[in-house]
Image: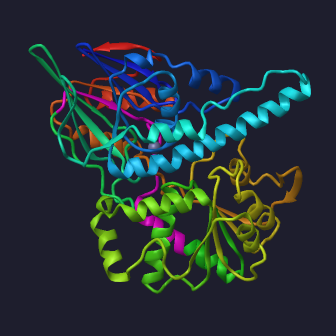
Amino acid sequence: MKIQFCGAVRSVTGSMHVLHVGDQQVLLECGLYQGKRSLARKRNKELPFDATKINHTVLSHAHIDHSGNLPNLIKSGYKGRITATDATVDLAKVLLRDSAYIQKKDAEYLNRKLRKKDKRAEPIEPLYSQADADEATTRFDTIPYRERREIVPGIHMTCYDAGHILGSAVTVYELREGDKTVTLGFTGDLGRPNHPILRDPQRLPRIDYLITESTYGNRLHEAAESMKNRLLEVVTQTFEAEGRLVIPAFSVGRTQNLIYHLAELFHEGVLPKVPIFVDSPLAINATKAYRDHPECYDQETKDLMENSGSVFGFDLVTYTRTADESKAINEFKGPCIVISASGMCEGGRILHHLKHSVPRAEDTILIVGYQAEHTLGRRLINRVPKIRIYGQDYKLAAQVKKMNGFSAHADRDEMATYIKHIPGLKQVFVVHGEEDASISFQAYLQNLGIKAHVPHPLEFVEL
Ligand SMILES: [Zn+2]
C-alpha cells in the first residue's frame, strides 16, 4: 500500500493525495490550485492521476483549496461517491456554487482580453459550470463524527473534530492489504484550541502515520482567548472617535467567528449599541450553514445560544445581500461596524467600503487575516501613503489595526502539541505549507524526536 502526494505539497493550495490499497484508490481532497491564472487553469484541468481509476473520495472540509476541483474531477470521468461530514456537505454546496460563479467570471475576463488581441480567437470555457458544481454536490455521502465506516473494500475511515471550520474533520484510515494493517491519519486543516464556535481538535487514537498540514509551521499566533477583549478595545476606540470600523474578512469561518465574539460582547452588555453590517452574500449563505449545524458547536456556544437565544442573528446585526443594500451602508451616518469580503481586499464589496473609510482619520480598518504580498490588504498594513482602489488614489488617513489570533489554523506549537500526543506514530508527512514552513516544521518535529518527511510533488511513499 502507498500514498501519492499530488497537490498542496511544498505549497498551500490544490490539496490532493491518493491512497493505493490493493486494487483500490481513494482520493483525499480535490482542491483547487490557486495562483497565476494561466498556470492555475492548466494545473486544475489536468489532474495528475486518472480520475476513472479512483474508487472513492473523502473531503476533510469545505474550503475551496480542498474541495474546489471536485466538479472537474467528475468532468474528468470520476464515477464514485464523496464522503464528508454533514456540515461539510452543506458548506461545500455553498462554496462550490460560488466557485463556479468565479470560474465563469474568470473565463469572461480572459475572453475579453483574448478578443482585444484577436477577434477570431476561440473563447475559453470556464474550468467548470454551475451545472458541474451541482452535479458534484449530488455525489456526497454524509458521515457523522466518530463513526467507523468501510468506504471501499480494505479501507475503513473515522472522522474526528479538527476545529478548523464548520464540519472540518481529521480523518483516520485503517488500511488492510492481505495480512497487513496500517493506520493513517490526515489532518486536513487543523484548527486551534479555544477557538470560538467549534469543538477543539480532538485527540487521535494510536496511528502509524500522519499526513499533517503546515500552513503556520514556522509561526506563532496570538492566543485565541485574548481576541474577544482585543476586539472590544478596537471597537470602543473607533466609536470614541465617532468613526466606522471596517473589517475585511473571509466569508466562511472568519466572519462567523467575528459575529460570535460581537454577540458575546453584546450579550455581556459591553458592546456599544451600534449597527453591524455583514455585507457578503457568500457570508450569508455560509452563516446559514453554521446556524443549521449546532451539532458541531462547543459547550460555550451551546450555552450562549441557550442564554441569549441567538448568536448569528442578534439584534444589532443586519445582513445585506443586494448591491443596493450594500451601497446604502455607506450612506449610514454615525459609528457602525462593516464586515465584508474579500479577506485580502483584492476584490468584492469590501473595496467600496474601503474607498469611503481609507481617507477618514476617524475610521479604523481592522485586519484579521493573513495578507499575502502584493495585496491591497498588505499595503494597508504597511501604511502605504496612497491606496489605489478602482484606479483612483486615496490618502490613507484611517487607523489600521491588525489581529492575527483569529486564524483558523493551528500555529507551530499548537500543531506540534497535537502531534506529540498521538500514540504510536512512526512517521509524519508534512504537506500544505509554503516550502519554508513545511521544512521548518519538519525540523521542529525531528527535534522533538518525531520522524518527519516533506514529500515532493507527485512522490509515492510506501506504507
Ligand atoms: Zn481550510
Q: What kind of colouring is applied to the model shown?
A: rainbow
The quadrant the N terminus occupies is top left
Of all residues, the one furthest to the left in this rendering is 179
- Locate residue 306: give its quadrant: bottom left
Q: In front here: 394 or 113?
A: 113
Residue occupying the point 18% across, 23% down: 154
Q: Is residue 227 magenta?
A: yes
Q: Where is ligand 1, by quadrant?
A: top left
> x, y (%) of residue 174?
18, 28
When the figure is inspected, residue 382 is found, relative to residue 415, above or below; the finding is below
Q: Which residues are magenta?
A: 207-232
Residue occupying the point 71% across, 67% down: 326
User: Can residue 365 be seen here?
Assistant: yes
Residue occupying the point 48% across, 62% down: 287
Residue occupying the point 59% across, 79% down: 236
When the figure is inspected, residue 322 is found, relative to residue 144, above or below; the finding is below
> x, y (%) of residue 388?
84, 51
The quadrant the C terminus occupies is top left
In screen coordinates, is 60 left or right of 398?
A: left
Q: Is residue 295 magenta?
A: no
When the figure is inspected, residue 462 is found, relative to residue 414, above or below; the finding is above
